[in-house]
Amino acid sequence: MQKNKLKQLWATGKPALNGWCSVGNPFTAEIMAAQGYDSVTIDIQHGALDYGDVLPMLQAMKASGATLMARVPWRDPGYIMKALDAGAMGIICPMVNTRAEAEEFVSYMRYPPHGQRSFGPTRAAVAMPGYGVAANDEVLALAMIETADGVANLEEIAATPGLDGIYVGPADLTLGTQEGRLPPGFDRQEPEMIALIKRIADVCKANGIKACLHCGTPEYAAQAIGWGYDLTTVGGDSRLLAGAAGASVAAWRKLNNRDGGTGGDGGMY
């Protein structure tokens, strides 16, 4: 069956760039996947989409050759197995707090005897001829560490057999560990958060798994790779669209002496 290109890239010692899709639209997904990302993740958890959007988005992105993944809403076997059956080659699972939860997540990812995934790869078998039990060796199980409990159990979680990596979401990690002292957000600059982010990478390396980080800018992502991260996500479709549109509007207003925000002329444009 189809090999996981992320695994092949990592085998050469190179880091990966991941794209992020939060807009439930196949054309938007196709545009993202065509830009040269090593992998692209569909955000089912917080994205403006559902499974009815996921399937055509995976279809639209297949030609790009990127490794296609999904962040599921929760540690739920139905979501996880259905995303895999649709053709996702990696699953990011949020809010993993203990070794037991990590073991449960991993068990949903793989067919017996290595897990309890149910067999029925409806689209995956069509999109990837030969798809079957061999998928056990190709799909990626990435757990998110986002809470104080997750951090406290970090070493035990990272040592879970079958877990391929840890994916860090800085916003929830900050909320979960700083007890409201810091606002959520990407690209943390606080010494205590940088120390924690570095620690996660070190624990991943010590356990032979991959460290992945959600970033806001390419500059921060490059810094994170220097800390030992193997995959970085930079922005995402909704943020990139808003940023480019906002920059275009600001440039037009400056060039045409039209300072001010939306509604400056009664909202009529």
Image (cartoon, rainbow, N blue to C red):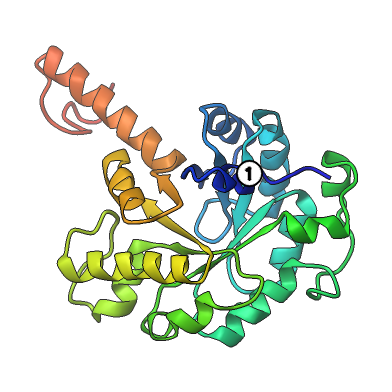
In the image, is residue 205 above or below residue 56? below
Q: Where residue 161 sits: x, y (%)?
A: 64, 76
Q: Residue at x 45, y 65 (%)?
A: 205
6 left or right of 132 in image: left
Quadrant of image for the C terminus: top left
Q: Where residue 155 sits: x, y (%)?
A: 45, 81
Q: Is residue 96 visible?
A: no
Q: Where residue 140 sits: x, y (%)?
A: 64, 58
Quadrant of image for the N terminus: top right
Q: Residue at x 78, y 75 (%)?
A: 115
30 left or right of 263 in image: right
Q: Which residue type does callout 1 highlight?
A: Gln
Q: Residue at x 54, y 61 (%)?
A: 45
In the image, is residue 142 above or below residue 154? above
Q: Where residue 150 sits: x, y (%)?
A: 43, 81
Q: Residue at x 89, y 64 (%)?
A: 119
Which picture quadrant has residue 196?
A: bottom left
44 left or right of 262 in image: right
In the image, is residue 50 above or below residue 257? below
- Residue assigned mark 1: 8
In the image, is residue 142 above or below residue 126? below
**Label 1 residue SS:** helix
